Image: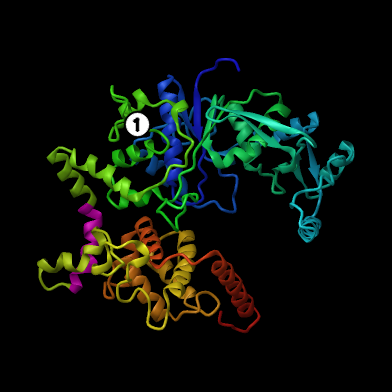
């Protein structure tokens, strides 16, 4: 590969709260670019319009800037390679789609959803791997063009190798052989005319002159598709580097049910940007080396810029350990000068807008100012869902506080109800008390949770405040905010304990049956 200026990128999708994985990739990409005098690009991958969430893009900017991750080019800054939102680049993708079709690297597929569903069912019945059968691959190009011009619905698919394998070079892993058995002719352009991630990403990485694609290892399975697509266009592929995934303690991929994943949660929980960045830097890297060969564990961004080497990243799955994060953050917090600590506390707890809103809820419920913190402490600090005498025990041995598990319900039933609430509130935008109440009242139904509003709302009150009494539930939830509220839901679910896979599968079936029955006018209990 020829030498070219170092240009790295991250490409988050505006489909939800900004993820700690985005921060992790952003940190590594920014540091690598800065070390080589290059450029760090922020691109917004918003071609999936069905999952697009209003306001998510601004939250991505806000969260990354809070952490101190600054990009050189992006939607809000501009740059010579823009536009930097994929939804604004559709003309570019159409032009390149036509080029790829002319070169024979792709083809139009006119298969209907019904045919594809039938194909999938037949393959499943034969216990075969489900994939497209290349039905339209050899369609005459002139006939294909005529049908498309006549308005017949179609997608565009990439021609993948029919035999052999594709070998991609990885900076950390060396050559990776991806076998043809796992390939299928991927969709590059959907029926709505929008490109898939594969198409848009490869075109943009080339046109943005990205030199290094540094991304999570979950993208390894897509590397063959991307290499074939680069070659079909006749382009040089950037250096690939697949970083190890952030993992839970059980080695599964980090998920919101087992760890808070929103960057905004950690800001709302009172972590310092320096502490979170330090912790993320340790995910796969040991830290700056001392003369004796040991590694520094506590360091700042400047030290990482001086000492970090991409080639030194370990491939062992780094565990996102909240206790380790608290330890690292505590070291940074205690190192603050006293004046800086005072300002940090004042800004976190007593920002004027937040204090005014808390006071409005507290004033009707207090008789002396000394009662203010008694009534409002859950707005400012952590909420414990376990009884005081069991809080220091391992999670399975802790007992829930009164009200978290309603009378007549089990921990398992409560976990399932909170799972439904978690899914619904995660999609909720805006996080406003009226929308919260409307959503939660809809969940207190036979076809959703099978719970009455009274028991569901009491459980939610305990989840959010740790108490059975508080100001109005939904006004309280609005003021607590989505990042912290979702974090507390996750904390409560972890305390209750996730049911096994068999129980989860059985529950999903029963839930679907409830919905079908309700839609048909009846109702059943799982």
The answer to whether residue 51 is left or right of residue 124 is: left
Q: Residue at x 59, y 50 (%)?
A: 49
The answer to whether residue 351 is left or right of residue 242 is: left
| SS category of the residue bearing label 1 | loop
Q: Residue at x 40, y 53 (%)?
A: 260
Q: Nearer the viewer, residue 510 or 381?
A: 510
User: Residue 377's image quarter?
Assistant: bottom left
Q: Nearer the viewer, residue 110 or 271?
A: 271
> Which residue does the numbered mark 1 point to in the structure image?
287
Please provide percent x and percent y for residue 37: 42, 19
**Does residue 79 lie above or below 480 as drawn?**
above
The answer to whether residue 338 is left or right of residue 70 is: left
User: Residue 219's image quarter?
Assistant: top right
Q: Which residues are magenta?
A: 349-365
| Mark 1 nearby-residue class (10 Å; few <14, some 14–19, many ≥20) | many
Whether residue 137 is in magenta: the answer is no
Outermost residue, front direction? Answer: 292
Quadrant location of the C terminus?
bottom right
Please provide percent x and percent y for residue 99: 75, 30
Q: Nearer the viewer, residue 444 or 406?
A: 406
């Amino acid at each position: 590969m020829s030498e070219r200026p170092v240009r790295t990128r991250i490409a988050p999708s505006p489909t939800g709260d900004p993820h700690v994985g985005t921060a992790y990739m952003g940190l590594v990409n920014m540091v690598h670019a800065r070390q080589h005098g290059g450029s760090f690009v922020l691109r917004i991958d918003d071609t999936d319009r069905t999952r697009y969430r209003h306001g998510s893009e601004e939250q991505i900017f806000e969260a990354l800037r809070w952490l101190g991750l600054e990009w050189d080019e992006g939607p809000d800054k501009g740059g010579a390679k823009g536009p930097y939102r994929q939804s604004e680049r559709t003309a570019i993708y159409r032009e390149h789609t036509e080029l790829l079709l002319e070169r024979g690297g792709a083809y139009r597929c006119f298969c209907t959803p019904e045919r594809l569903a039938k194909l999938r069912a037949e393959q499943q019945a034969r216990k075969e791997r489900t994939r497209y059968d290349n039905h339209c691959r050899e369609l005459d190009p002139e006939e294909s063009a005529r049908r498309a011009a006549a308005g017949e619905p179609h997608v565009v698919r990439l021609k993948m190798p029919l035999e052999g394998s594709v070998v991609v070079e990885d900076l950390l892993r060396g050559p990776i052989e991806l076998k043809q058995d796992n390939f299928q002719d991927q969709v590059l352009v959907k029926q709505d005319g929008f490109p898939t991630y594969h198409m848009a990403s490869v075109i943009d990485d080339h046109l943005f002159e990205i030199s290094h694609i540094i991304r999570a290892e979950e993208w390894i399975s897509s590397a063959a598709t991307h290499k074939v697509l680069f070659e079909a266009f006749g382009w040089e592929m950037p250096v690939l580097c697949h970083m190890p995934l952030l993992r839970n303690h059980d080695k599964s991929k980090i998920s919101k049910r087992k760890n808070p994943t929103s960057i905004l949660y950690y800001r709302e929980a009172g972590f310092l940007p320096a502490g979170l960045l330090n912790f993320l830097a340790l995910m796969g890297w040991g830290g700056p080396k001392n003369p004796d060969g040991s590694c520094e564990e506590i360091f700042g961004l400047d030290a990482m810029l001086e000492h970090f080497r991409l080639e030194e990243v370990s491939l062992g799955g780094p565990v996102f350990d909240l206790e380790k994060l608290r330890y690292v953050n505590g070291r940074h917090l205690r190192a603050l000068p006293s004046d800086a600590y005072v300002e940090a506390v004042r800004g976190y707890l007593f920002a004027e807008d937040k204090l005014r809103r808390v006071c409005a809820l507290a004033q009707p419920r207090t008789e002396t100012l000394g009662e203010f913190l008694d009534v409002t402490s859950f707005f400012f600090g952590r909420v414990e869902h376990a009884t005081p005498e069991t809080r220091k025990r391992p999670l399975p041995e802790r007992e829930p506080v009164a009200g978290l598990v309603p009378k007549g319900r089990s921990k398992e039933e409560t976990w399932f109800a909170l799972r439904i609430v978690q899914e619904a509130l995660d999609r909720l935008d805006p996080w406003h008390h009226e929308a919260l109440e409307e959503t939660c009242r809809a969940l207190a139904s036979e076809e959703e949770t099978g719970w009455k509003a009274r028991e569901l709302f009491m459980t939610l009150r305990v989840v959010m405040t740790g108490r059975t009494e508080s100001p109005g539930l939904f006004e309280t939830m609005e003021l607590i905010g989505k990042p912290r509220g979702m974090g507390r839901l996750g904390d409560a679910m972890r305390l209750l304990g996730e049911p096994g896979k068999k129980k989860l599968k059985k529950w999903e079936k029963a839930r679907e049956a409830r919905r079908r029955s309700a839609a048909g006018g009846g109702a059943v209990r799982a």
